[in-house]
Amino acid sequence: MRGKPREAGVSAADELIHDHIAETAAIPADGRVIDLGCGRGPTLAAFARRYLGARLTGLDRSAVSVEAARNLLAGRAGGVEIEVVDLGKPTPLPDRCADAVVSYNLLECLPEPAALLAEAWRLLKPGGRAVIAHVDFDSIVIAGADRELDRRICHAFTDDQQPWMDHADGRIGRKLPGLVNSSPLTLERAHPWGTSSTELTGPAARRVENIRHVLTGAVRNGRTSVEVDEIEAWYAKIEEAAECGHFFFAETALVVSALC
Ligand SMILES: C[S@@+](CC[C@H](N)C(=O)[O-])C[C@H]1O[C@@H](n2cnc3c(N)ncnc32)[C@H](O)[C@@H]1O
């Protein structure tokens, strides 16, 4: 692999969407990209691999994630700025400063996603490109668990507002084209990005564990009507299915590119 080492816990399969976002952005070799909700920096790392001279700017509200992103990109030649910023408000960056603005899995937790798209438009140079991508959590397909229980668990996960979120819209992936069409940006392309596995490993295992962990926390905090016993019964069935070759996992992210 060229460029920076992988972030701990991020496998090659998880990196594919970040590389796809970087490829779709198609910035000049020395262009500037701003990642809104950069988290621990996997998308910025994909830009660093692809565009060796690019200027990378990442914004995120979590100081812990910003620190991790800075560490991930440490030592990279070329500009890297990663700052703690609340994206529920306008950013402190000037108009028309970026060749691309990207965002992955942020919008679901903003009460006003339209404001973020307007901000992306403000930050872009004329002709610049926004690439907004988001998993649609209602697209999760799992073979292995009991039908009714699986529906109950997956819907509870999709609808849960976790403590770090100001809002929750687990179905925002499918709304991205409409949101872009209501923004000052011009929709270029909307397409699905699928992740799938017949094994309970990699991204599939991480999502199943993520659902189990989030919903167990939701039970503890009284945010869901699902019971811990149900979550564990669901999980046990999935493990059982994986052992006898009956497991399947798929989820879809929507990837939208739009021009300023
Ligand atoms: C699911 S993570 C995705 C992170 C990253 N894009 C990735 O692909 O790994 C969502 C990120 O949005 C950030 N976030 C949530 N609300 C935010 C807000 N109001 N302002 C800035 N960042 C926010 C969280 O801190 C978190 O890092």
Image (cartoon, helix red, strand yellow):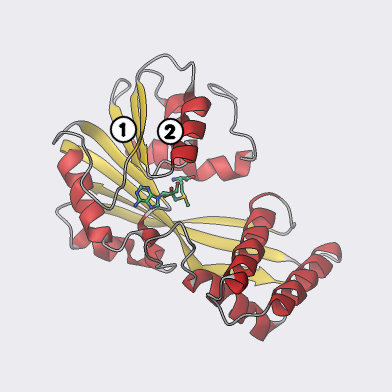
In the picture, the quarter occupied by the N terminus is: top right
Residue at point 39% right, 56% down? 191
Judged left or right of residue 153, residue 253 is left
Taking 3 as reference, is 229 above or below it?
Answer: below
Numbered disc total: 2
In-front residue for pair 109/84 = 84
- Asked if disc 1 and disc 2 are in contact, CB closer than 8 Å, the reply is yes
* Residue 189 picture location, percent across and down: 30, 53
Judged left or right of residue 32, residue 9 is right
Residue at point 23% right, 41% down? 91
Judging by the rendered image, the residue that carries numbered circle 1 is 33
Judging by the rendered image, the residue that carries numbered circle 2 is 44
The verdict on label 2 being within 8 Å of ligand 1 is no
Q: Give the amino acid at mark 1.
A: Val
Q: Secondary structure at mark 1?
A: strand
Q: Quadrant of residue 83?
A: top left
In-front residue for pair 213/173 = 213
In the picture, the quarter occupied by the C terminus is: top left
- Classify mark 1: residues with Cα within 10 Å, few (<14), some (14-19) or many (20+): many
| Residue extending furthest toward the right | 244
Q: Secondary structure at mark 2?
A: helix
Residue at point 70% right, 65% down? 248
Residue at point 15% right, 34% down? 96
Taking 145 as reference, is 77 above or below it?
Answer: above
* Residue 2 picture location, percent across and down: 55, 22
Marks 1/2: CA–CA distance: 8 Å
* Residue 133 picture location, percent across and down: 39, 52
- Classify mark 2: residues with Cα within 10 Å, few (<14), some (14-19) or many (20+): many
* Residue 245 picture location, percent across and down: 82, 64
Taking 212 as reference, is 222 above or below it?
Answer: below
Q: Give the amino acid at mark 2.
A: Leu
The answer to whether residue 19 is seen in the rendering is no
